């Protein structure tokens, strides 16, 4: 084992020890907060807002650290994506905003049910809006592509990875539909594209033959990726090639339309001229001026 591998292993073990210690300390703090709640309820007949906020913050942090540890020791067993992830960060921020709002209401002596319900609805709307605002791209980089996948929660439902020169396209299932995220590399590390940074250059859906051809572009790197999705019938293996001699990887998955076979590849950084795909003997010419085609 090389010195670099030993250092990586030592750092990984140190991270695991820190997580274990953090989980234990947060558990102790959570128990202490529960005892404080019990004492306040017993002696004063009510629980202070400060104690409730402290309990909520402790509970959220404990859940995130415990989720990270569980995900590390039981990979792929839970649908819940533990630890510091895209969704969990937003839930945590909204929880803090909700608690701050309650504290302000108490100071203004307006801690009534109608105000609490109204504030809860506003925080829920805020959470929904935040889920579409991928502000991390401007400030956060990841040391590896795998870390970016874990943060955005696409690692568990991943179908395939296609490697380009400066980016990786990750195909994954979400709500029983195939979606795409492109992770690209910059000087500071790996970043994940937002919805606006992935452009669909070509989409051809043939409902008669049950196949779809999609070409996507990462506008950050200018790289093109292609997916050819066919409905699986009688364990048939489709024959596919193109004029670019693209290496297609075959993946099988199940979505809302049933069993599917996906052939995925990397096309480079320019639109191929006179581009033709050969799918089971059929010659399909790609016209880049027609971006959305439906055959019924």
Image: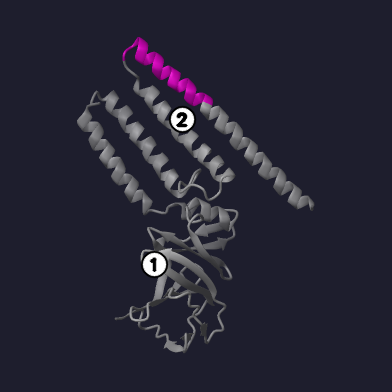
Q: Is residue 40 shown in magenta?
A: yes
Asked which secondary structure carries label 1, the reply is strand
Given residues 49 and 159, the one toward you in this image is 159
Q: Nearer the viewer, mark 1 or mark 2?
A: 1
What crowding class fits label 2: few (fewer than 14 Cα within 10 Å), some (14-19), or many (20 or more)? some
Residue 208: x and y, percent? 33, 81
Left or right: 17, with 224 as reference point: right
Q: Is residue 244 shown in magenta?
A: no
Which corner quadrant of the image does residue 45 belong to? Answer: top left
Left or right: 4, with 193 as reference point: right
Q: Label 1: which residue?
A: 258
Q: Residue furthest front?
A: 234
Asked which secondary structure carries label 2, the reply is helix
Residue 81: x and y, percent? 47, 47
- Can see residue 141? no
Q: Quadrant of the C terminus?
A: bottom left
Total residue callouts: 2
Marker disc for residue 58:
2
Given residues 52 and 221, the one toward you in this image is 52
- Can see residue 118? yes
Q: What kind of secondary structure does the magenta stretch mostly adopt?
A: helix
Q: CA distance from mark 1 to mark 2?
A: 43 Å
Q: Which residues are magenta?
A: 28-45
């Amino acid at each position: 084992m090389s010195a670099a591998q030993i250092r990586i292993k030592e750092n990984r073990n140190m991270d695991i020890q820190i997580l274990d210690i953090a989980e234990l300390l947060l558990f102790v703090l959570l128990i202490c907060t529960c005892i404080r709640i019990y004492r306040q309820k017993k002696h004063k007949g009510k629980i202070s807002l400060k104690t409730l906020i402290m309990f909520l913050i402790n509970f959220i942090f404990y859940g995130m650290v415990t989720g990270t540890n569980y995900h590390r020791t039981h990979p792929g067993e839970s649908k819940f994506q533990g630890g510091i992830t895209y969704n969990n960060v937003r839930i945590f921020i909204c929880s803090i905003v909700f608690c701050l709002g309650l504290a302000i209401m108490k100071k203004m002596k307006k801690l009534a049910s109608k105000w609490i319900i109204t504030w809860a609805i506003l925080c829920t709307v805020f959470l929904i809006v935040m889920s579409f605002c991928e502000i991390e791209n401007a400030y956060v980089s990841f040391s590896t592509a795998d870390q970016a996948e874990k943060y955005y929660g696409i690692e568990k439902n991943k179908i395939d990875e296609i490697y380009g020169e400066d980016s990786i396209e990750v195909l994954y299932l979400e709500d029983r539909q195939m979606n795409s995220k492109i992770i690209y590399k910059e000087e500071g590390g790996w970043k994940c594209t937002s919805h606006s940074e992935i452009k669909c250059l070509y989409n051809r859906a043939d409902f008669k033959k049950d196949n779809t051809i999609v070409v996507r572009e990462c506008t950050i790197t200018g790289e093109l990726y292609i997916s050819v999705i066919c409905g699986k019938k009688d364990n048939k293996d489709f024959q596919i090639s193109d004029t670019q001699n693209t290496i297609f990887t075959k993946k099988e998955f199940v979505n809302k339309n049933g069993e599917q076979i996906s052939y995925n590849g990397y096309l480079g950084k320019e639109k191929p001229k006179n581009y033709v795909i050969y799918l089971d003997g059929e010659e399909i010419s790609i016209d880049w001026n027609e971006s959305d085609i439906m055959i019924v």
